[in-house]
Image (cartoon, grey):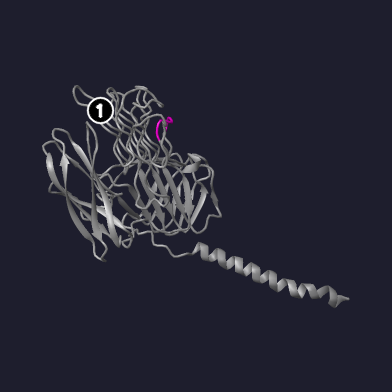
């Protein structure tokens, strides 16, 4: 009788033990997966204990060993001249118990445009005298219009990114980007009106850790990439939300991330979270709800083997060779007429359709389309002649179509 009672135990325990060991091995593998965040650690171990502004280098890349923002502390960034996103890379843990801002600016009290966050785009300027209002900046920039309101066809358009807002307007910006946020790009600005500027687009930030990204549990933490609000003119011409991309083997805690427009006058931005181990993560704290995409693709977008498009020079003005933006340069007054724009494509392995965008402070944005032959293994450059308007500063960008 004893042998009959013990027999099932002799069969069951090895099976249970094997299952336990298998589960433990899987968990260990998830926790120790090899991932290179791209950080060289040159900024060392940093703990932010007071409200801090971080000046972005020319390429926007911040190299940490470890990085932490304590509870009750706010971190903002001073944009570089090339309007790159924030690339916050760490060899070790990233701990977010405080607040990180890359948000776009509101249309100012003096009726000026809201400024885009780092990697995001400005709102369109208001009309001044005989100068017409300007279109919102960025691939989803709202076009200039009047003060009519959200659902009037002639109203200035809101900035778009993942979504559009203000279905009645014919001046809405275009939807753009992809769920993986590669390449990383921020939100777009709302169009200007005769009396008020548009809201600025939310910025873009990549947070990548070779080990772990952990959000605090006190509820006072968040990453804010909201789009800027409209002024007081009546048009729904706010900027779109921006982009937040997190990459690490493990992500833990309640992920409080906001890529909406702050007063509901612009489109939603995008959130992407890539990890192998989500067991300690708490979803449901992001806004808006449909902005989130997640998976296990441990890629930052900075890897040298990924397709990349660079703006090399405009009208003879050369950008840094390590520029990781999709292409941005501000031209002063005095640069006008047909001007050469040099663009480089790499790692596409195909014919690359590109669009060069010239956005003056006042007046309509213009677009110039071309193709770069990048079918070979080496980078390919092409020169395009585009028209730069006179007597107005203009921003020049380049994107794939």
Query: At which x and y percent is residue 247?
Result: 43, 54
Q: For residue 208, say whether it is visible.
A: yes
- For the view shown, which residue lies furthest in the bottom direction? 3
Position of 6 compared to 209: left or right? right
The residue located at (29%, 56%) in the rendering is: 308
Residue 394, compared with residue 308, is above or below; it is: above
Q: Nearer the viewer, residue 113 or 154?
A: 154
Residue 181, compared with residue 14, is above or below; it is: above
Q: Which residue is mark 1?
A: 133
Query: At which x and y percent is residue 168?
Result: 41, 29
Q: Nearer the viewer, residue 216 or 236?
A: 236
Residues shaded magenta: 262-266
Q: Is residue 235 magenta?
A: no
Q: Nearer the viewer, residue 10 or 137?
A: 137
The residue located at (75%, 74%) in the rendering is: 11
Q: Is residue 264 magenta?
A: yes
Q: Residues within 10 Å of mark 1 (few under 14, many from 20)?
A: many
Q: Quadrant of residue 376?
A: bottom left
Query: At which x and y percent is residue 365?
Result: 24, 37
Q: For residue 256, say whether it is visible.
A: no
The residue located at (32%, 30%) in the rendering is: 198
- The residue tagged with tag 1: helix, strand or loop? loop
Q: Quadrant of residue 241?
A: top left
Residue 114, compared with residue 19, is above or below; it is: above
Residue 250, compared with residue 132, is above or below; it is: below
Q: Main secondary structure of the magenta part?
A: loop
Position of 176 compared to 131: left or right? right
């Amino acid at each position: 009788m004893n042998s009959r009672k013990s027999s099932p135990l002799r069969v069951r325990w090895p099976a249970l033990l094997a299952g336990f060991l298998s589960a433990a091995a899987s968990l260990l593998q998830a926790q120790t997966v090899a991932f290179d965040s791209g950080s060289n650690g040159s900024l060392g171990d940093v703990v932010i204990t007071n409200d801090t502004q971080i000046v972005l280098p020319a390429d926007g890349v911040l190299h940490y060993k470890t990085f932490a923002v304590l509870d009750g502390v706010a971190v903002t960034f001073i944009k570089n001249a090339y309007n790159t996103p924030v690339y916050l890379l760490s060899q070790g843990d990233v701990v977010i118990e405080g607040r990180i801002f890359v948000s776009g600016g509101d249309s100012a009290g003096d009726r000026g445009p809201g400024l885009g966050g780092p990697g995001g785009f400005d709102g369109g300027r208001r009309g001044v005298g005989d100068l017409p209002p300007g279109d919102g900046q960025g691939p989803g920039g709202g076009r200039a219009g009047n003060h009519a309101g959200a659902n009037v066809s002639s109203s200035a358009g809101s900035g778009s990114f993942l979504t559009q807002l203000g279905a009645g307007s014919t001046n809405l910006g275009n939807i753009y980007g992809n769920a993986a946020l590669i390449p990383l790009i921020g939100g777009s600005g709302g169009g200007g009106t005769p009396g008020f500027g548009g809201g600025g687009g939310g910025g873009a930030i990549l947070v990548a850790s070779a080990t772990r990204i952990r959000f605090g549990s006190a509820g006072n933490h968040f990453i804010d990439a909201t789009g800027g609000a409209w002024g007081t003119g009546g048009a729904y011409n706010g900027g779109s939300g921006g982009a937040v991309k997190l990459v690490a083997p493990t992500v833990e805690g309640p992920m409080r991330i906001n890529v909406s427009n702050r007063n509901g006058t612009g489109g939603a931005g995008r959130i992407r979270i890539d990890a192998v181990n989500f067991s300690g993560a708490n979803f449901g704290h992001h806004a808006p709800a449909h902005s989130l995409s997640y998976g296990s693709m441990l890629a930052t977008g900075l890897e040298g083997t990924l397709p990349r498009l660079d703006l090399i020079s405009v009208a003879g003005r050369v950008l840094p060779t390590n520029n990781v933006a999709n292409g941005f340069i501000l031209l002063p007054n005095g640069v006008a007429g047909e001007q050469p724009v040099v663009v480089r494509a790499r790692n596409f392995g195909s014919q690359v359709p590109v669009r060069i965008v010239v956005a003056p402070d006042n007046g309509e944005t213009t677009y110039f389309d071309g193709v770069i032959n990048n079918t070979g293994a080496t980078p390919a450059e092409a020169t395009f002649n585009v028209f730069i308007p006179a007597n107005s500063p203009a921003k020049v960008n380049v994107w794939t179509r």
